[in-house]
Structures are given as C-alpha cells and as structure tokens.
Image: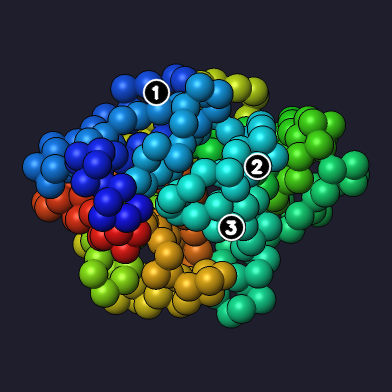
Amino acid sequence: MTDHHQSTRGKPRVALVTCTELTELDPDDRLVLAPLAARGVTVEAPVWDDPDVDWSSYDLVVLRSPWDYALRRDEFVTWAATVPALVNPADVVHWNTDKRYLAELTAAGVPTVPTSWVEPGESWQPPADTGEYVIKPAVSAGSQDTGRYDLADPEHRDLAVAHVRRLSTAGRATMVQPYLEAVDTEGETALLFLAGPDGLAFSHAIRKGPMLTGPDLGPDGLYKAEEITARTARPDQLAVAERTLATVPGGTRQLLYARVDLIPGPDGDPVLVELELTEPSLFIGYADGAPDRLATAITTHLARRA
C-alpha cells in the first residue's frame, strides 16, 4: 500500500476474514470494530471462499474466523497464497494449519504434550496401558473431531480405534496424546500476543476449562463451546511461550497475533498443547484494553505496508 494508494481511496480498508456461518463475525472479534473505526479504518468481514471478493482491494487482510477450512485445508492454503497483504502470512498459515509442526517444536527443545502420529492408511491399536488418551486430527479447528478415551474401558478402546479409522479413511493424519489430568483442575492457559511497534508483545491470558468429556461421536457444530475466564500468566508460562515463539519460521515480526496454549505436565511444569498462528480466538473481551491493543496491532501492520 502506497501513500498515493491510500489517499486516493480514503480510509484504509481492512478485511477481517470469516466463514459463511459467521458473516457478522465472532462476538469477540466485533469488539475491535469500534477501536478501528476510531483510528479511521474501514472494516469489512468477507468470507474466505467467496469467489467474488477482490482481496487485492484491501490494505490488510486479517484471518479471524474462517473456521470451516479444516476439511478443505489444501483449498484454504492455496487460497491464502493468493491473498496480498495477508496476516498472518500464507507461509505461516501453511506451516501452522497442520499440527505436525509440534514435532518440529519438540525437536527444537520446546516442552510439548507427548504425541504419536498415525498417518492415513496406517493401522493403529491402543497402547497396552490403561490411562486416558486424546485422539484428534492433525488438521482441525474448534476442537472438532477430538475425543477423550479411558483405555481401561473396553468400549472406549473400541471407540478409539474407530475414531482413528474414521480419520484415516478420510485421508486425515491422527494425533494420539496422553490426557494430562491437570486440565481437569488447572484448565488450559492461553497466552495472547499482539503486534506492537517493537514486534510481538504479550497482551493477556485466559483460562479454558476442561472441554473433553468423552469419546468423539461425530460432528456437533462449527466449534465446541468453551468455558473462559481471565487469568494472570505466570513467569514459567511466559518463559515457555517465549521459547515457543522463538521457533516460528521467519520470526515473529511478521505476525499480527499469536496464541500459545499451555497445560501443566505430570510434574506441574507447563507444556505446549498448540501454537495458534492461523485463526485463533483472541479473547479480547476478557482483558482491559485488549480490543485497543488488537486495533493497534492492525494499524501497526498497516503502517508497515504504507
């Protein structure tokens, strides 16, 4: 975007990208509209797979709630590569939308939830032990197609095998992880980072209550409901988040936002569940000033492109 480009069109135009089911945006995202308007930014909410959208007409295209892409990841990644001024950028989207990136982070020394992988077409049997396990696809959004299985229960063992088979038959890679019991009491901590003048900076944290109550029995909506409360991030959590962000290919200056999801491991130390760089809920309604900080992040990236 050049100064001439912006001045001939008036206010900078920003797209907050969504999906057909959320054409009015997620309620949390709507909280940034007033701060952006106050900064002289025109905002629209186009649907990512709408063929009639001229993406080049926007000064910045911000991925927010395109949450129906999981079963069409190839189409989504291909689309992202065609969009000028996309944040987070298309190469980050390509890397981050397949959770096999967790293997890279583990190899880089980031403490992560232990994960085994079942590729499409591979057979799988539950481990011999009788603990609880989580099964989910490597490409997903909104905790869809995710289940919790107690392997001491023969029915759960059968359902776990069926879940992996269902994903494999659909050509989807599967993640198998031990269920970390601290989720039931401590919950999950999401640390939110937003772009500022000096790069990505910590904004706020929230707690997610436990979500997985049992086996996955099929689709039940665009995303699973979450129990969210504000939380103060601890120094050890911030340290793991910083280590995680340090591994992002291409560095963090290119990012508009990042969300680092942590849970306590068996020894109580935080371990990474996911690094969300594509379309994370940012929970800006749970922290004073967060809508303004997101608006500042967006105008910061606009300024870089000016």
Marks 3 & 1, CB-CB < 8 Å contact: no
Numbered-mark total: 3
Residue found 58% across the figure and 43% down from its top: 82
Q: Name the secondary structure under disc 2.
A: helix
Q: Name the secondary structure under disc 1.
A: helix
- Residue 306 figure quarter: bottom left
Q: Return the mark for residue 22.
A: 1
Residue 215 at least partly seen:
no
Residue at mark 3: 91
Give the mark nearest the N terminus, 3 or 2. 2
Give the mark nearest the N terminus, 3 or 1. 1
Q: Is residue 206 rendered to the left or right of residue 221?
A: left
Q: CA distance from mark 3 to mark 2?
A: 10 Å
Q: Is residue 55 rendered to the left or right of residue 237?
A: right
Give the residue type that dot 3 points to: Asp
Answer above or below: position of 157 versus 248. above
Give the residue type that dot 2 points to: Thr
Give the residue type that dot 1 points to: Leu
Q: Nearer the viewer, residue 303 or 206?
A: 303
Instruction: Residue 190 in the image: state x and y as whole percent.
Output: 36, 55
- Residue 109 figure quarter: bottom right
Marks 2 & 1, CB-CB < 8 Å contact: no
Instruction: Residue 85 in the image: state x and y as whole percent.
Output: 43, 50
Tag in front: 2 or 1? 2
Dot 3: few (<14), some (14–19), or many (≥20) neighbours within 10 Å? Answer: few
Tag in front: 3 or 1? 3
Residue 89 at least partly seen:
yes
Dot 2: few (<14), some (14–19), or many (≥20) neighbours within 10 Å? Answer: few
Q: Is residue 76 rendered to the left or right of residue 254?
A: right
Q: Return the mark for residue 78.
A: 2
Instruction: Residue 299 in the image: state x and y as whole percent.
Output: 23, 54
